Amino acid sequence: MTDRIPSQDRTTTGRTAATSRAAEDRTAPEHPAGVSRRALLGTAGATGLALGAVGGGVGYALAPGEDEGPTEALTRLGARRAVFHGRHQPGITTPLQAKGHLLAFDLLAGKGRREAANLLRRWSETAGRLMAGEPVAADGHDTGVALDAGPASLTVTFGFGHSFFGRTGLEKRRPEALAPLPQFSSDHLDPKRGNGDLWVQVGADDALVAFHALRALQKDARGTARVRWQMNGFNRSPGATASPRTARNLMGQLDGTGNPKESDKDFAQRVFVGPEDGPEWMANGSYVVMRRIRMLLDDWEGLGLAEQEKVIGRRKSTGAPLTGGGEHTAPELDATDGNGDLVIPLNAHARITRPDQNGGAAMLRRPFSYHDGIDADGVPDAGLLFLCWQADPLRGFVPVQRKLDRGDALSEYIRHEASGLYAVPGGAREGEYVGQRLLEG
């Protein structure tokens, strides 16, 4: 069972609305449109009111003291809900969310397996409540940051870093696939912004909902773990385009065209760990590689459109390969122009990353863009929080990145500044917490 959310948008996972309504759909029904203002603003999980109209109608907001009679919700965005419990953790095949937070925690000195188990139990309880649109605590004690919003497709995902197993005395249960990533020649990594004992991903279609979850999880960790690093990202808001489109990154390129699709026969085999592929506690889990990739936007934007398209090997406007067709047309890698030159250059990013050019290696890309300000020279610190999911990073990310490292034309315009690899166990069953089979097995 996957962590799908009803949506009319196609995302980089290649999902359609029909896929989201398949038999394995794990989402809850949306709230009805005709509900009272009190229900909209005061009930956990309700749809939030918008100040503007949707589709051309007149928008309004009720002032204090106005009649609280029935009114119509102006958006369904806040009502979308993902379910925490299931075969896989949420936030892996979930459609791209508008706001994301990535964090890594290190256990405090003297804290081990028992304290880690208690923390994962608290985190799982908090995540389950917030994803259902409920207050962070049953006693009603809450910051109130997201009080008048629904769950807004909130997902929370947990993983373990390489160092976690040594800190908890579980070295013998560390998966072989969690071996440290090799060094790549193009890396300019800041060790303070990579790795970590525990990894958390928060995603939502509303920034306040995402921050609310981030704050609750940080508070849960007090006395057990401290934040090692945090990164904040964003994507295009759902419904911002007139029709479903693959998302664009800050270079203006469609990002995720070649993603494996859930309809592919080998999708699960490529993305999720099978019962025979690793430790029992990792069954139905996945491995995620995180890379903070700074885009040298001034250099990139100094190129002409034709030069940019040769670097990527695709049309910027449509994502179609330079050899013609549409976004999902297979490129003709042997095609030449009138001068006998390859239409798609040998070092084009799209050529190097194709699965059939990498022994079938495939990764499910699910990134966030980021912008961390502009430096004194007027250069933006912006780029991509690259996240890719796979059943085995030694067969997925590593061989592809090695090939990119040797001759990708895009390397001149990007810089890898942080990195991490995490084992993300399968989803928690009802009454379980994430990682319980590891920590109590």
Image: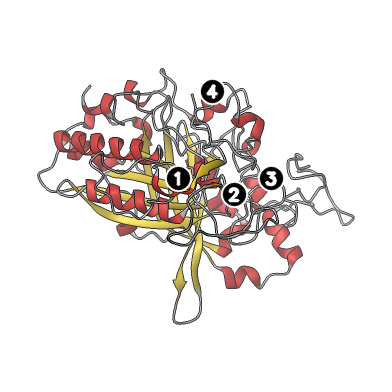
Q: CA distance from mark 4 to mark 2?
A: 22 Å
Of mark 1 and mark 2, the one earlier in the sequence is 1
Residue 184 seen in the figure: no
Which residue in the protein does label 4 denote? Answer: 24
List x then y, in percent, for residue 253. 65, 56
Is 34 on the left or on the right of 131, as rendered? right
Q: Position of residue 158 (x, y in %)?
A: 35, 39
Q: What is the total number of numbered labels drawn onto the structure image? A: 4
SS for dot 3: loop
In three-dimensional space, the C-alpha distance between marks 1 and 3, rounded to whole angstroms, equals: 23 Å
Crowding at mark 1 (Cα within 10 Å: few <14, some 14-19, many 20+): many
Residue at point 51% right, 40% down?
80
Q: Are marks 3 and 4 in contact (CB under 8 Å)?
A: no
Task: In the displayed orientation, state which residue is furthest to the left.
Answer: 110
Q: Which residue is mark 1?
A: 150
Left or right of 333 in this view: 110: left
- Labelled pair 1, 4 in contact (Cβ < 8 Å): no
Seen from this angle, which residue lies furthest top?
A: 276
Q: Residue at x 70, y 62 (%)?
A: 308
Mark 2: few/some/many CA within 10 Å (<14, 14-19, 20+):
some
Give the x, y percent position of residue 173: 26, 27
Q: Secondary structure at mark 1?
A: loop
The type of residue carrying mark 1 is: Gly
Looking at the rendered structure, the secondary structure element under dot 2 is loop
CA distance for labels 3 and 4: 22 Å
**Residue sitting nearer the eye, 67 or 441:** 67
Residue 238 image label: 2
Viewer-proximal residue, 372 or 298? 372
Label 3 crowd (10 A; few <14 / some 14-19 / many >=20): some
Most foreground residue, 344 or 211: 211
- Precedes in sequence: disc 4 or disc 2: 4
